[in-house]
Image: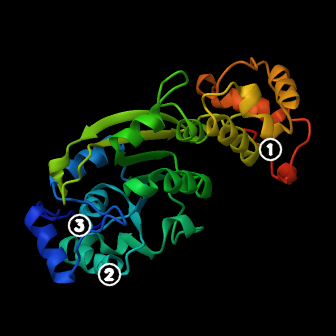
């Protein structure tokens, strides 16, 4: 094991501002950049994420490295994915300066997370990230699909997005993100984060969401794409009954009703009442499958 980091290795408010000034970095709304400036907060995130000494953690959007350093205190390895060229170029030097004994356990990928298909080194076992608010859900779903070795995930997102991800059937905010996240994991809210721990302070509160990989995948003969197509169609017109909302997906309202009845779902139900397993059954019972039929079924 490499030497332990110094007690003051994490970034405080003055460190973050100084780093940003040296780099000429001004946080942009376009990329949803709000840097964490509180060491207690990043350590809390690492604890809540249940990061372990043997974990290989992938972090998306490390920024100036606040959370990265806290992850390196505990995890075996950390791979950070950063889209911003200036921030990506500076991060290895920050790690080397503040945690020289752990620098060899850090890897950087300078890329858009949505374009990442592989990572250097061992396969990731955990995903921990302060996700930019404007791309949080697509990035999360892309990472979970691309890296099935991820067992535990903890993301910090806008509080409203956190509520949506963790919502269950029947909730007012249950929707596409809720169902798709539940395809991969058991999802729950794991805490709230105030605005003052960020620079600049956002005008919304943040929430932590925990996603633990499902012990058993959703058992279905339908592919993930087929199931997600039903989910997208059901919530595109969420005020309509499923018979009406799925008419386009099925080819007609009558075909939608037939698929729903075969799946044991009321044609008068709405998408917000259904579990991911029920969406999968509907997908299985579509009369004419589309071109994704050759995708592998989702079996344990």
Secondary structure beneath label 1: loop
Q: Residue at x 19, y 77 (%)?
A: 97
Q: Of residues 105 and 92, which is closer to you in this image?
A: 92
Name the image quarter holding the C terminus: top right
Q: Residue at x 49, y 39 (%)?
A: 212
Q: In the rendered view, would you say 20 is above or below 68?
A: below
Q: Position of residue 142 (x, y in %)?
A: 57, 56
Upstream in sequence: badge 2 or badge 3: 3
Scheme of image coloration: rainbow
The image's mark for residue 171 is none
- Mark 1 crowdedness (10 Å alpha carbons): few <14, some 14-19, many ≥20: some
Secondary structure beneath label 3: loop
State the residue position of label 1.
Answer: 297
Q: Nearer the viewer, mark 2 or mark 3?
A: 2
State the residue position of label 3.
Answer: 3
Q: Position of residue 277 (x, y in %)?
A: 69, 29
State the residue position of label 2.
Answer: 86
Q: Position of residue 298 (x, y in %)?
A: 75, 42
Secondary structure beneath label 2: helix
Q: Is residue 12 left or right of residue 62?
A: left
């Amino acid at each position: 094991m490499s030497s332990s980091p110094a007690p003051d290795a994490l970034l405080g408010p003055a460190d973050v501002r100084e780093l940003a000034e040296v780099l000429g970095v001004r946080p942009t709304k376009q990329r949803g950049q709000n840097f964490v400036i509180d060491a207690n907060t990043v350590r809390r995130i690492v604890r809540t994420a249940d990061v372990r000494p043997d974990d290989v953690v992938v972090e998306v959007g490390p920024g100036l490295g606040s959370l990265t350093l806290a992850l390196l205190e505990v995890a075996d390895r950390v791979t950070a994915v950063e889209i911003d060229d200036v921030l990506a170029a500076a991060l290895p030097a920050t790690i080397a300066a503040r945690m020289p004994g752990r620098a060899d356990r850090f890897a950087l990928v300078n890329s858009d997370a949505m374009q990442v298909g592989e990572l250097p080194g061992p396969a990731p076992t955990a995903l921990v990230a302060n996700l930019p608010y404007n791309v949080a859900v697509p990035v999360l779903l892309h990472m979970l699909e691309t890296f099935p070795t991820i067992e535990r995930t903890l993301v910090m997102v806008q509080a409203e997005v956190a509520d949506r991800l963790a919502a269950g059937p029947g909730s007012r905010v249950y929707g596409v993100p809720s169902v798709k996240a539940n395809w991969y994991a058991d999802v729950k809210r794991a805490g709230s984060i105030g605005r003052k721990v960020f620079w600049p302070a956002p005008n919304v509160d943040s929430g932590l969401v925990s996603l633990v990989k499902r012990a058993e995948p959703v058992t279905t003969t339908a592919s993930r794409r087929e199931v997600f197509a039903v989910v997208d169609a059901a919530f595109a017109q969420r005020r309509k009954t499923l018979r009406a909302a799925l008419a386009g997906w099925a080819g007609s309202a009558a075909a939608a009703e037939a698929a729903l009845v075969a799946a044991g779902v009321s044609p008068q139900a709405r998408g917000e009442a259904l579990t991911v397993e029920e969406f999968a059954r509907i997908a299985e019972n579509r009369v004419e499958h589309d071109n994704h039929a050759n995708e592998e079924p989702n079996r344990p």
